[in-house]
Image: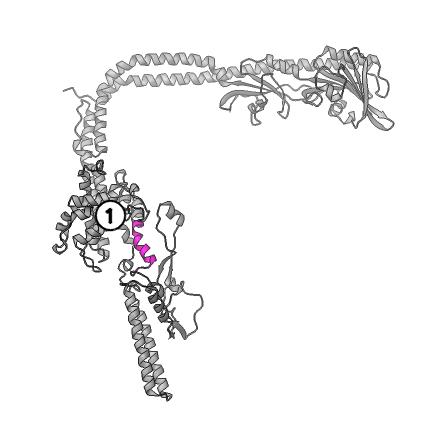
Amino acid sequence: MFKRIRIRTNILFHFLFLVITLAAALVGIQYYFSEQMAKEATARIFRQTADNITIQLRAKDTLSKEILHQIEHHPAVNITVDQTIPLTTVQYFVHTLQRYPNMYAIYLGFKNGDFFEVVNMKINTTIHSHYKAPPRTRWSIIKIYNRSGERIREFIFLDKRLHILDRREENSSYLTITRPWYIEAIHAREPVRSDPYLFSNLQLKGITYSKKINAAQTVLALDFTLESLSHILSTMKFAQSGQISLFGRDRHIIVTSKEAKNSLKEHFPNTLSPNEVHTIEINQTRYYTMLIPLTEEMGKKTYVGISVKRDEMLAPYREKIYYALALAILMLLLFIPLTLFFTDHIIQPIKALMQENEMIKQRRFEEVKPVNTNIIEFIELSNSQIAMSQSIRDYQKQQEALLDSFIKLIADAIDAKSAYTGAHCKKVPVIAQMLADEAERSDAPPFTDFSFKSDDEKIAFRRAAWLHDCGKITTPEYVVDKATKLETIYNRIHEIRTRFEVIWRDIEIVYYEKLLQGEEKDYLEKWKTEEQQKLIEEFTFIAQCNLGSEFMNDVDKKKIDKISQRTWIRHFDDRLGLSEEELQRYDHENATLPAEERLLSDKKIHLIERFGFNKDAYRKEGFKMEVPYYLYNRGELYNLTLEKGTLTPEERFKINEHSIMTIKMLESLPLPKEMKEIPKIAGEHHETMDGKGYPRQLSKEQLSIPSRIMAIADIFEALTASDRPYKKAKTLSETLMIMHRMKKEGHIDADLFDLFIRSGVYLTYAKHYLPKSQIDDVDEKILLG
């Protein structure tokens, strides 16, 4: 026996947990600070790149300013468009364009709206087709001026030696004084730079530098493409995934590095605050992005946007983390055997306690035993576990006893509700359990594999048998007990008889009135006797029809209809003394009194509406019984002309509805897993093997063996019951022959019925529960055929 020690002592051997926790925390902290360092390094690189771009832009702006200053002081710019342009001017402009490959055009704008431009036709291949220039055109001159009151645009196309290849003219509405580059330059002392825009002739982005060059308000302008700037941005890349863009004041893209995609703008949403490194996610890839405002130059505000993949910047730092993590894992692997050795005497008792706990979970209370360990806390826990197991077992037994008592209480209440049900709810479980036991013992198909997998399933089956008619608690007693056609809570034949009495009295009154008027007495006596005899015969016929003991044919229906045509006089208001619910079933207007009434009638007040019925929900739950429109129809003619029996279709549905209510009531209960089949077993005992039963019209294949057993038990008990006041008890042979026909017609399971006969369950039950007068000889060979 090991020395008992406290669990606190064993905690000393669990330092491994602290090591792992500490290592994880250190790696996590290292990862956090590595990411911060990567972010700070990225910010530094971004700012350095922005500074370099600023230097490049300043150099470009400075160069452009110098070009403008050089040109404005050259004599070649002192010209007007309406005169012949000197060749020296063209040569000077061409020379300047040749020196700067990205310069697209040099032009002059005059105060009177005239325009003179020299265009570098080598800048782009599309420009020839746009200007309709000859193939060998190297330079183009464009002049816009007034001539004879019209605005003329003149094109002169030159080859590389400045020889004229062709020229053409067209009308134009172009005025330089309306152009932004002219307007901004006129109002500025220094050269101005335009926002980047798309050169329509080139389909390339570019910018315009312009400057007022003399007192005559002539403006000199240079057009540059941005291709060189894109190349500059590409040379400043600091990482493989790095992308750089320039944005204008409205954050529209000016130019990007050559490798940048068209969708780059989504890296810099309008919500992005400048001068901060942000992490954004695009297509499941994270990027570091930063928007940096550049120094305002020439009146324009420009931003540089820089983007790089986050993983690329973190890669060097992650490599160090991976090394540290690998070292920690290696150390952990070295400590695992030692840790297992020291913790084994803690783990084993815990596992043993878990096994005991699993037994409690499976309710195997008698198998729960103490755990052998030297740890005091575990010993105390084991003792507590055993005590808890005993307490749960006792409590469960009490709860199950209470549940079974409550179930039997419900069954007793249903049996006591009507003398017509007798002890049905008590006896069906007996028959069902006996037949289920035989099915479990049988080795013959289809029962070879049938068995209840646990005691819980057996209990569930037994409880389902007790509850199979619990839905009858919702069925009105007067519907179940309806013995005559006109019966509701009472037999309405008395109302009919009273009307006959009224008509009898009316015949008497008419007799005496006519006698006083002097009519012949013998004739009147004969008339009165015949009329009253006819009344007696008609009432006798109506009373006989009310019993429902014979089939109602069309002749009898017509006779009832003819009798109903008799009338009597009502002198009292038939709405007095009625409930609000009854009054709602009347017509809105009262009949004028005295009122003539038919002897028999179907009235609106006889129709009871069905409220709260949801057809879609009903079908969704799988119920297939046809639901009558009305809850009840108490029409006198409607009931008296029933062809068979005493129940209307509405009342028949109300009785059959008990199977639906059984299912709904039981499904509404929070049944444990092992009891989940109770609603199905209890609610399917009126289903038939041919799929014509109710409430769901299930076929044999859709019914479980327990459900089929319930059907046989229910029918056998109902046929042999000797405690029903409405029928004489059938003998065993009569009952079983009826069930034999039901087997042949596919109403009940043939295999189960044969087992019911072969096993002798029917006889065992009969000897215990039936009077000897019902037990007669049974020919089992015929029944098994």
Percent of width and height locating residue 249 = 64, 24
On screen, residue 399 above or below 111: below
Percent of width and height locating residue 162 = 80, 12
The quarter holding residue 66 reads top right
Of residue 261 and residue 779, the one placed in the foreground of this image is 779
Q: Is-magenta flag for residue 654?
A: yes
Query: Mark 1: which amino acid?
Result: Lys
* Residue 209 appears in the picture as rendered: no
Quadrant the N terminus occupies: top left
Percent of width and height locating residue 105 = 74, 17
Name the outermost residue toward the right.
Answer: 148
Question: Could you tell me which residue is drawn at 21 percent across and 40 percent down?
Answer: 458
Classify residue 187 as left or right of residue 461.
Answer: right
* Boundaries of the magenta span: 646-661
Classify residue 225 as left or right of residue 259.
Answer: right
* Residue 531 appears in the picture as rendered: yes
Which element type, helix, strand or loop, lies under badge 1?
A: helix
Classify residue 513 as left or right of residue 59.
Answer: left
Of residue 43 and residue 354, the one placed in the foreground of this image is 354
